Image: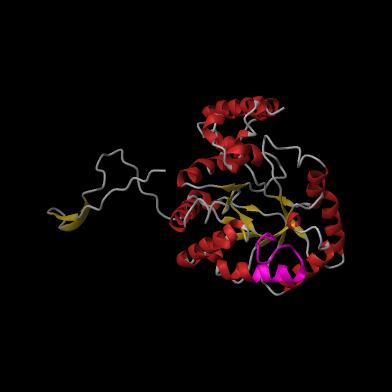
C-alpha cells in the first residue's frame, strides 16, 4: 500500500484594502474554483444506525474486525484504519482474545484511549481461544474477560461472543451462569454466540426463561459463496428468536473483493490456500456477476458482496477484517448500495 502526503507550506497573509480585513491564505490549498468544499461536522455515515437485535445497542451496519491487527497490521497502521472507519461513520469494532495472542485487543485499546472514543464505540469481543485461558469454563471465562478488559483499557464489553468451538467440555448452563455474573457486575452488557448449534440456541433460550442471560447476537461464517452452513435450522432458529446475525467471512477470505483471480498469484500460505479454494467455476461465475453489478452501480466488487449480505433480512452487520485504509473506503460503499430484485436474482443464479 502506498501513502502519498503533501508537505506543509507556510501560510501567508494579505490585507484587503477595501474592507481592511486581514485574510489568511494557505499556499498549499487549491485555488481552482472547482476544488472540493471542506466538510465540517460529523460524517454522513454517523447518522446511519441499526438496532443490534435485542441488545439495546445501535450500530453502523458494518463491523470492523481486528483479526489482522498485531499480525499483518502493526499499531500505527491499525490506528489509521480505525480512524478511517470512524471518519466514515463507523462505530462497531469486533476483536478476539485469540487474535495475535491478545495483541489485537491491545492495539484497539490503545486507539480508544488515545482518541478518548470508548463511549462512542460498540465493542464486541470473542472469548475462548487465548492460550492462557482457553475454553468457556467458569474460571477461565472470568479470567479471559478480565484480561481482555485490561488489554482494551475499558471497564466493560458491549458484546461478549462465547466461542462454543473452543470448548466441548463445559456445559452451556455453566457458561451462562458465569456470564450472568459478568453481566450483573457490569463487565459485559450482552452475549453473543459463535459455533453453537441450532439445538444449543434453543437450549439457551429455555435457560433464559429460567433467568439466565440471553444470547442475542450470532456470528456465523456466511457469504454469497458460503450459504450451506447457515441456510438451515440455525437460520430458522436465529430468525425465530430475533437474534442479530453478524456474519464473519463476508468476503470469503478476500476472494469476493475481486483482487485475487489467479491461483498462481495467491501463494501457498494458509490464506492463499483459503482463497484458492474459492477459485472454481462457481466462484468465477459469482465474481463475474458481482463485477457486472458493481460496474452498474459504480461501486467496487467487494462492496456488492457486502450489499448482498445486508439484503438478507436476518443480517444486521457483516464483519470485515481489512489491512489497508483503502479497503475501508471500498467496503463501506456496500452499506449504501441497494440491490434490486433482478440483481439479487442474478447473483443467486451465479452462486448456484
Q: Residue at x 58, y 36 (%)?
A: 255
Of all residues, the one furthest to the bottom in this rendering is 185
Q: Residue at x 63, y 56 (%)?
A: 58
Viewer-proximal residue among 147 and 91 = 147
| Looking at the image, residue 246 lies above or below residue 352 | below
Count of numbered marks? 0
| Picture coordinates of residue 245, whole percent (x, y) | 71, 49
Quadrant of the drawing holding the C terminus: top right
| Picture coordinates of residue 41, whole percent (x, y) | 43, 55
Q: Give the range drawn in magenta.
A: 127-146
| Looking at the image, residue 279 lies above or below residue 321 | above
Of all residues, the one furthest to the left in this rendering is 17
Image quadrant assignment for residue 1: top left
- Work out whether residue 307 can be spotted: no
Look at the image and say whether residue 217 sits in the magenta stretch. Answer: no
Q: Which colour scheme is used?
A: secondary structure
Viewer-proximal residue among 284 and 298 = 284
Q: Residue at x 64, y 33 (%)?
A: 278
Left or right: residue 18 compared with residue 292: left
Q: Which residue is drawn at 55% across and 36% down?
A: 257
Viewer-proximal residue among 292 and 134 = 134
Amino acid at each position: 500500500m502506498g501513502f502519498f502526503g503533501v508537505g506543509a507550506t507556510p501560510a501567508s497573509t494579505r490585507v484587503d484594502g477595501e474592507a481592511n480585513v486581514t485574510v489568511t491564505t494557505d499556499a498549499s490549498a487549491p485555488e481552482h474554483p472547482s476544488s472540493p468544499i471542506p466538510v465540517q461536522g460529523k460524517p454522513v455515515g454517523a447518522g446511519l444506525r441499526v438496532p443490534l437485535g435485542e441488545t439495546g445497542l445501535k450500530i453502523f451496519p458494518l463491523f470492523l474486525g481486528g483479526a489482522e491487527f498485531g499480525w499483518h497490521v502493526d499499531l500505527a497502521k491499525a490506528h489509521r484504519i480505525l480512524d478511517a472507519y470512524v471518519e466514515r461513520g463507523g462505530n462497531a469494532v469486533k476483536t478476539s482474545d485469540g487474535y495475535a495472542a491478545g495483541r489485537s485487543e491491545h492495539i484497539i485499546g490503545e486507539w480508544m484511549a488515545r482518541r478518548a472514543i470508548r463511549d462512542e464505540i460498540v465493542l464486541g469481543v470473542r472469548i475462548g481461544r487465548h492460550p492462557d485461558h482457553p475454553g468457556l469454563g467458569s474460571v477461565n471465562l472470568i479470567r479471559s474477560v478480565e484480561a481482555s478488559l485490561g488489554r482494551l483499557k475499558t471497564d466493560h464489553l458491549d458484546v461478549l461472543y462465547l466461542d462454543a468451538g473452543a470448548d466441548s467440555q463445559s456445559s452451556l448452563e455453566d457458561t451462562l451462569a458465569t456470564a450472568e455474573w459478568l453481566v450483573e457486575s457490569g463487565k459485559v452488557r450482552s452475549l453473543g454466540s459463535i459455533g453453537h448449534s441450532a439445538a444449543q440456541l434453543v437450549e439457551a433460550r429455555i435457560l433464559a426463561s429460567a433467568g439466565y442471560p440471553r444470547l442475542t447476537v450470532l456470528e456465523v461464517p456466511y457469504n454469497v459463496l458460503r450459504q450451506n452452513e447457515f441456510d438451515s435450522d440455525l437460520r430458522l432458529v436465529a430468525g425465530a428468536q430475533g437474534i442479530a446475525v453478524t456474519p464473519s467471512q463476508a468476503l470469503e477470505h478476500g476472494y469476493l473483493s475481486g483482487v485475487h483471480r489467479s491461483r498462481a498469484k495467491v501463494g501457498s500460505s494458509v490464506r492463499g490456500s483459503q482463497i484458492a479454494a474459492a477459485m472454481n467455476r462457481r466462484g468465477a461465475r459469482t465474481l463475474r456477476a458481482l463485477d457486472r453489478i458493481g460496474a452498474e452501480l459504480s461501486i467496487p466488487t467487494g462492496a456488492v458482496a457486502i450489499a448482498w449480505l445486508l439484503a438478507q433480512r436476518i443480517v444486521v452487520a457483516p464483519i470485515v477484517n481489512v489491512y489497508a485504509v483503502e479497503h475501508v473506503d471500498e467496503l463501506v460503499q456496500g452499506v449504501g448500495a441497494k440491490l434490486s430484485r433482478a440483481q439479487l436474482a442474478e447473483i443467486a443464479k451465479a452462486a448456484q
